[in-house]
Amino acid sequence: MKLELIDWAIIIIYLLISLSIGLYFRKQAGKSLTDYFLSGRKLPWYVAGISMVATTFAADTPLAVTELVGQNGISGNWLWWNMLMGGMLTTFFFAKLWRRADILTEAEFIELRYSGKEASFLRGFKAAYLGLFMNVLIIAWVNVALATLIEVFFGIPRGETWMYVGAAMLITALYSSLSGLWGVAVTDMVQFVLAMTGSIVLAVLVIQSDKIGGISGLTRQLPDSALNFFPQIGMSENIGTTLTITVASFFAYMSIWFMSWYPGAEPGGGGYVAQRMMSARSEKDSVWATLFFQIAHYAIRPWPWIIVALACIVLYPDLSDTDKKLGYVMAMQEFLPIGLKGLMIAAFLAAYMSTISTQLNWGASYIVNDLYKRFLHQPKENVDSEKTYVTAGRIVTLIIMAVALVVTLFIETISGVWSFIIECGAGLGMVLILRWLWWRINAWSEISATIAPFIAYGFSKFVLGLEFPNSFFITVGFTTVVWLLVTFITSPSDHKTLEHFYNKIKPLGSWGPFSNRDQNTGNTKELLLLIVAWLSATVMTYSILFFIGDYILQHNSNLITWGASGITSFVILYFSIQNSNLFQEKTETN
């Protein structure tokens, strides 16, 4: 596919804007580690929230949604829609606590919450495991998605696409290393607007084409099962013309949100989502940013992709299950005119760069703050150590880029990386939630819950020969038994550490040894109010999601139901928040 001069002009202008933002924030980011990795804790909620949404819109996202819809209809999106439960749990229970912790990274949280050499080991291990190993895998799978786009859209052989991916990655690494999170967050806003504009334009052009004939033409050419919002559960998949998922798959999907670690949807918060919470200018901004992220991520953003994905079922019926994701790129080739091709390529670059810039900055924060600063570097007298750490952050950003580019060459499928990450975090989720809510969780609990999934996954896959979802349940069961046993046969963190954590954070849940009876009574009421807020916000977001979907698909009979559900849940959410202490800032620290 050949691009015209105007297409190249649009792409070049976008890249220059991204680099200009990086240069603009260079001095601001260079003041300190907090400025470089957390924007000086000054991000307003809308910047932090949009940055979260932009980061989760990667080059692979529209392709992944197209594949899910092509294989299982709209209901195939429950593979990730289920994670809204965990996202809203983080919003109401943990977002303000992450901001209150006054730490730089999730790994640093470990030595705030736990004590002893085991806590120091866990902090260093997680910094390397998440900041380098997992981070590089995530970057590599996003690189593979961009390579697939380049290969299909331009007809460039797979062996040559890595050069173009490397160039895009180098530009991203340059502006993110220069500007830190300041530039990353501001650039995310530009990238999100551009990426969503491109997605919406493509959806409109495809649906209005003669081959589809508008929404009415689309729905006439599709089986009803493809348009169902909820999966049909059966004993086997794709029975006849009815799209179904197995019972095991259904329960695996619906339990991932609280059982498994997954980037961007960590139980209890974590990763780059926690980074944005900690970068917010107040606890209130942290909550609003996270709430906005959940609503935009799950309810608003997916529909342009889903509509194109449904059209691809009609347009390209001969694509195999593994190639259905390519339908999105083929639609770009077929329906985008001159000028809009450049806009869409720029939109994909924006989606790609917003994710990569965050992963590079986030990963570097772990390596610098939780390995280099914590264990390796001893500041010398009369030396500005903050500038030294910022310089280290910029160097590490470039190193992570280089390593990830090499790893990209060895990754064949995106789904293979996805299943590996889901399986190797299975069972860890409950510990990540309970470490905020139960004083008895200790560093050994988290260490065992991190290691056990690898053992169970290896046994299930290579000894028993099982695949997801059956292997998932074995991994979850084994990991849960292991961390519970380890928790009760090891000592809790020392009293002084737990007391300091409780007084600083004021978490809810079971903290009996560190709170009096009056506090426990108040905590119970607050806990109930936040549970109501969590559930009502979840229902509200799903209602918005399905209302928009039925409106687009012209299923008018369902609009009243979803509208009433959304309004009712909003009212419940409003009054539960008003009567809770969710937006009450904690000013004193013992």
Image: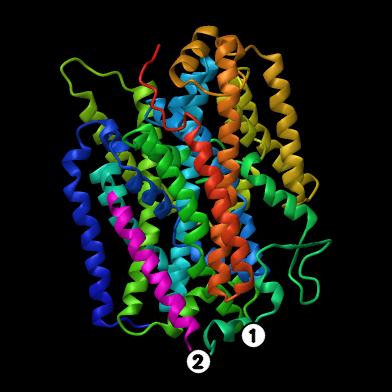
Mark sitting on residue 210: 2
Three-letter code for the amino acid on which mark 2 is drawn: Asp
- Is residue 93 at least partly visible in the picture? yes
Horizontal arrangement in the rendering, residue 377 relative to residue 466 (left or right): left
Which of the 4 quarters of the picture holds residue 227? bottom right
Q: Which residues are magenta?
A: 186-210
- Whether the magenta-drawn stretch holds residue 194 is answered as yes
Give the residue at x 54% y 54%. 567
Residue in the foreground of this view, choosing between 491 and 375: 491
Residue in the foreground of this view, choosing between 225 and 468: 225
Q: From the viewer's perspective, is residue 504 above or below residue 302?
A: above
Give the residue at x 71% y 24%. 484
Q: From the viewer's perspective, is residue 300 above or below residue 589?
A: below
Which of the 4 quarters of the picture holds residue 534? top right
Report helix, strand or loop for mark 1: helix
Three-letter code for the amino acid on which mark 1 is drawn: Gln
How packed is label 1: few (under 14 Cα within 10 Å), some, or many (20 or more)?
A: some
Magenta segment's dominant SS is helix
Taking the view exactly as shown, the residue that stands out farthest to the right is 235
Q: From the viewer's perspective, is residue 226 above or below residue 180?
A: below
Mark sitting on residue 221: 1
